[in-house]
Every structure is written in structure tokens, then in C-alpha cells.
Image: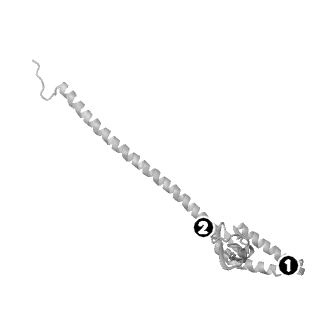
Amino acid sequence: MIQSNPERENPVTDKENSSKVESGDIAALKKALEEERAKCEANLAGWQRAQADFINYKRFVEQEKAEIYKQANAGLILSLLPVLDDFERALSAIPPEMEKQNWIEGLKLIDRKFRDILEKQGVKSIEALGEEFDPRFMEAMASVKGKKDVVVQVLEKGYMLNDKVIRPAKVIVGNGEEEANKEE
């Protein structure tokens, strides 16, 4: 007589139980895998955002550094502009009969060199005479007879450093009275 061992389980029942356990384990593992994939994707997206932010930050710092470098000499240049104005006034006051003297030619050469150096540093003068008044580049000191809102006289030249006004031109602007007189 074959006796069955109670410790030994029924092979049919074992298969059912193992398939239930396996399918439960597989479902749990699939769920855990999906959760880990979601975490992985979130971490990847966060890392990509951080990398993009860092690249943007580096670009911003480089641009700011370049701008600071461009404007670093503004204070020095601004303090030199009155010297340039005085030099210009001195050269314009030279009598015509003295203009051909060597020392006058030397002064003119110094003036050209000074202007060339400033130009290489990014300094440009603001052309205002005969132009329409623009408050971004000019400061109106007075208003006189003349074509309305047109600069009739420049009292002090204005200058820009790398497309930024460091000293506005001080000008006298026409008030439009001359036009009214011409029409009458």
C-alpha cells in the first residue's frame, strides 16, 4: 500500500499556489519597476533642468562680465572728456596765421592720437548740431528762435561708450518761432 506522506504536498495544488505567488510577485515587481522608472525619469528631468539652468547661468555671467569689462573704463574716460573739450577749444582759438607753425601741427597730432585712443576704447561723439532733439542723447539747456525741436547750437559735446551714453550733449533747441515768422 502506498502511503501518502502528509508532509508532501499535492503537486496540483503546488502548481496553483506557485503560480498565484509568482503572478503576485510579478505584479508587485512590475509595480516597483514602474515606480523606479518614474523616479528615474523625474531625476533625469531634474538633472536636465539643472544642467540647462547652469548653462544659462554661465552664459549670463559671461555676458555680465563682458559688459562690466566694456564699461570698466567709463569713469576714467568721463574724467578725460573735459580735457578733450579744453583741447578742442584751444585748437579752435588758434589764429589762422599761426596754423602752419610746427608746434601747432604737433598739438593737432596729439589731438588726433587722443581721439584715436578714445575711439579704440569704444568712445564716439554724439552728433547733435542740426539734428532733431533726442532726450536719450541730449540735454536741452535753452530754447531759442529756430526750427522747432532742432538743435541750433551745441554747448558741450556728448559722448557714448560702446553704445551707452556716458555724457549727454548739452544743446540749445529751436522753439519754432522762426518758422512762424517765415510764414507771415
Looking at the rendered image, the disc whose residue lies closer to the viewer, 2 or 1, is 1
Residue 162 position (above or below residue 94): above
Question: Dot 1: what SS?
Answer: helix
The three-letter code of the residue at mark 1 reads: Ile
User: How far from the left and from the top, in percent, is residue 78?
Assistant: 67, 76
Say how many tags the image has. 2
Residue located at (82% from left, 77% from top):
107
> Where residue 19 sits: x, y (%)?
24, 30
In-image side of 107 versus 176 (left or right): right
Q: Point out residue 34 in the picture as x, y percentages from the top left corner.
A: 34, 41
Q: Residues within 10 Å of mark 1 (few under 14, many from 20)?
A: some
**In the depicted structure, whether residue 161 falls above or below residue 59:** below
Q: Is residue 152 visible?
A: no
Q: Amino acid at mark 2?
A: Ile
Cβ atoms at labels 2 and 1 below 8 Å apart: no
Q: Disc 2 versus disc 1: distance between alpha carbons? A: 38 Å
Residue 104 numbered mark, or none: 1
- Which residue, given by chain and number where applicable, does mark 2 sit on? 68
Seen from this angle, which residue lies furthest left? 1
In front: 174, or 183? 183
